[in-house]
Amino acid sequence: MFKEAYNLFNQGKYSEAIKYYEKILEIDPVDSDAWSNKGSAYVELEKNDEALNCFNKSLKLDNKNYNSWHGKGIVLENKKMFEEALKCYNKALELNPNFPNAWSNKGAVLSELNMDNDNAIKCIDKALELDPNSAKAWIDKALILFKLESFEESLKCFDKAIELVPNKPLLYYNKGRALAGLERFNEAIKCYDNALKLNPSYFSSWYNKGNILLKLKKFQEALKCYNKALELNPSDYSVWINKGNVLAQLGQFNESLESFNKALELQQDNEKAWYNKGRILFELKKYDDALKCLNKSLELNPNKLDAKKYKEKILSFMS
């Protein structure tokens, strides 16, 4: 049954694999590896509590099961419990120093903890030394380099990961972000389009593509992207703000005002939304209301120079 469960797991049939592991555990409830593998299947299904329970049972039966320490680390990392995850990865590496995924995950967690990015990259390089074809390690390294704004180096790592896993939309999305960091905007748009071909419901790709089109002053195209993003997630205030900015550029001030109002429904203390709402009310010659909005923006961010300038402009119109 182990072989059947293993094959189902590798085929991405995680729920079916779990059923097989449950049958194995009915026969032998003290099989540490079966508990560990069942936990790994739950990880893939994003059922972290169930996975953690399995890994803990596995480790109770065999405290030297490095796969279970590694799996427990993944769950704790998913739960943003990075210090606890780091302890688990260290334990896995103590038991098996040649465990590439544990090295890669340790590097990712060190970066999350902002402890030592140089050491984080060394950990991932160790993973790549052990397994040069580890897509996960190339991705983790790319993300750390992106965080450090080393966009050229990050881009090379994303390209390597895409060679290994060409059908993963997240990789094209992140490559697009690296290209945007290098101000290679047209190439970035192509990457977002590649991500959207693979997953047309990829919210972040629609949103980031819209942001680049806004920078390129392609306002109608940007508006289409923001509308698509809002179809997928109407509760994201940042999209409403950017949509409002695009509509303002198109001279559609009433529609723009509606977008900023929607953003403020979602986040009442957003100084950008208050500032932009004030700017639009000024364009609509509603000076008293505009002044109230700019005062609110400055209350939230007293150092916002643009809001101060607009306030002075309104006061001069009113005097």
Image (cartoon, rainbow, N blue to C red):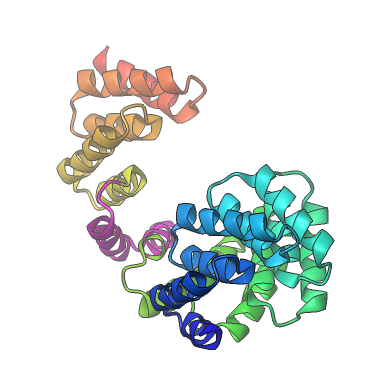
User: Measured along the vertical axis of the image, is residue 14 above or below residue 50?
Assistant: below
**Residue 80 at what x, y percent from top left?**
56, 46
Task: Judge left or right: residue 18 versus residue 220.
Answer: right
Q: Which residue is drawn at 81% across and 63% down?
A: 95
Residue reaching furthest top?
Answer: 319
User: Measured along the vertical axis of the image, is residue 107 above or below residue 308?
Assistant: below
**Residue 289 at what x, y percent from top left?**
21, 21
State the residue in front, 93 or 314.
93
Residue 310 is a magenta residue:
no
User: Measured along the vertical axis of the image, is residue 288 above or below residue 146?
Assistant: above
State the residue in front, 308 or 295.
295
User: Measured along the vertical axis of the image, is residue 50 above or below residue 176?
Assistant: above
Task: Judge left or right: residue 166 versus residue 205.
Answer: right
**Residue 10 at what x, y percent from top left?**
52, 83
The answer to whether any part of residue 184 appears in the image is: no
Q: Which residue is drawn at 52% across and 54% down?
A: 53
Residue 74, quarter of the rendered image? bottom right
State the residue in front, 262 or 116.
116
The answer to whether any part of residue 314 appears in the image is: yes
Residue 209 is a magenta residue:
yes
Q: Which residue is drawn at 18% across and 33% down?
A: 284
Magenta residues (range): 206-235
